[in-house]
Image (cartoon, helix red, strand yellow):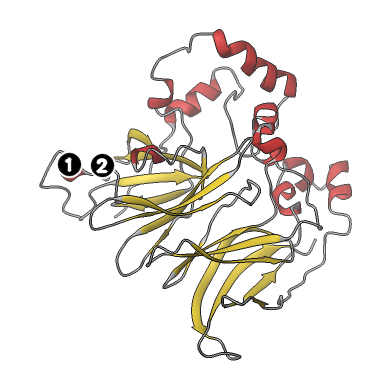
Amino acid sequence: MYNSRHTVDPLIESLRKPGSYDKFSFGQKRDPCQSFFRKVMSAFTPASSPTDDNNGNANIGVTVSVNTPGLPSIKDVDQAGHASGIQSLWTKTDASIFARLDPETLEPIGFADQTALLPELKGPFSAAHAKSDPITGDIFNYNLEVGRKTSYKIFHVSATTGKTDIIATIADAPGAYLHSLVLTENHVVLCVWAGHYAWGGTKLLWERNFLDALSEFDASKPAKWYVVDRKHGKGVVAKYEGDPFFCFHTINAWEESSPSDPSQIDVVVDLSAYENLDVLKKFYYDNMKSTSPTAREFMKDKGASYSRECPSLASSVNCFDWHLHSWQSIA
């Protein structure tokens, strides 16, 4: 037996009535005059409801987490809990907000953001695919602030105590759309790949969607890799640069003794990589419809299928091997 339901019914209804969507989205194209200038002018316009974002009008539903440490659970108000063992059910997206669902009915019952874990986690962006330690249940993710100064805060939430602490701060990388990160036995690995937010992130106010707020792919800007110690408080222990690429999902990662120096550790990362940002635009309706003039133009020279293995990256600190297997669909 399973349960299924829409968790954004009020949002759907709010779209149905005017036939448009005036909030931030992932890829919904907007008229810049209606996005940027309307936001400026609406700064002095009272909201239609003081609880507008608390009644289901937030679209948060990329990933689901059970019994997320650090966030409220049923046991906070009811010691009995559910027979299933599910004490809390939270959905996440590529932002620092969570939606809480009733574990039985799946009805939205509340919202939270990462400041509930730690006040310092005040940036608007995060990974929908946080990582959890399979043994301890501890959670690892990043919180990104953009603007004049960009800052990634890599944080850890203890499954035992619910306490959150920042284990590293990265301030020398551009703000980017990072859907996932990497976890090994002893490290968190953050790769800042292509998909950088344009204008220091302020282009979001103009475009009102993530996709069009990204800078164009630049082959001269390498991917930046940060290896963070997650057990001994050492912070960032290694940095590397490699070939530029874009990625949604990491696949696997592990540590092994370096064949060139057994006293050192190799960190091996497998992920699904794209050679540029074309995949982000490929699924626009105009680029998929066979009779659309823009589809033929968009797919020009984009039909090749390929795979590659990038060379290992080494430093005096340790050796970090990474393997990228990239695919493009055959048109």
The residue positioned 23% from the left and 58% from the top of the image is 160
Mark 2, secondary structure of its residue: loop
Is 282 left, or right, of 123 in this rendering?
Answer: right
Q: Is residue 59 above or below residue 273?
A: above
The residue positioned 73% from the left and 74% from the top of the image is 307
Is 175 left, or right, of 279 in this rendering?
Answer: left
Disc 1 to disc 2: CB gap under 8 Å: yes
Q: Position of residue 218 (x, y in %)?
A: 80, 53
The residue positioned 38% from the left and 38% from the top of the image is 119
Q: Give the quadrant of the C terminus.
A: bottom right
Q: Which one is in front, 26 or 199?
A: 199
Residue 150 seen anywhere in this rendered image of the structure? yes
Residue 291 seen anywhere in this rendered image of the structure? no
Q: Residue furthest left?
A: 80
Residue type at mark 2? Pro
Mark 1, secondary structure of its residue: helix
Residue type at mark 1? Asp
Mark 1 to mark 2: distance in Å?
6 Å
Residue denoted by label 2? 72
Q: Position of residue 85 (x, y in %)?
A: 20, 55
Q: Which one is in front, 137 or 101?
A: 137
Residue denoted by label 1? 76
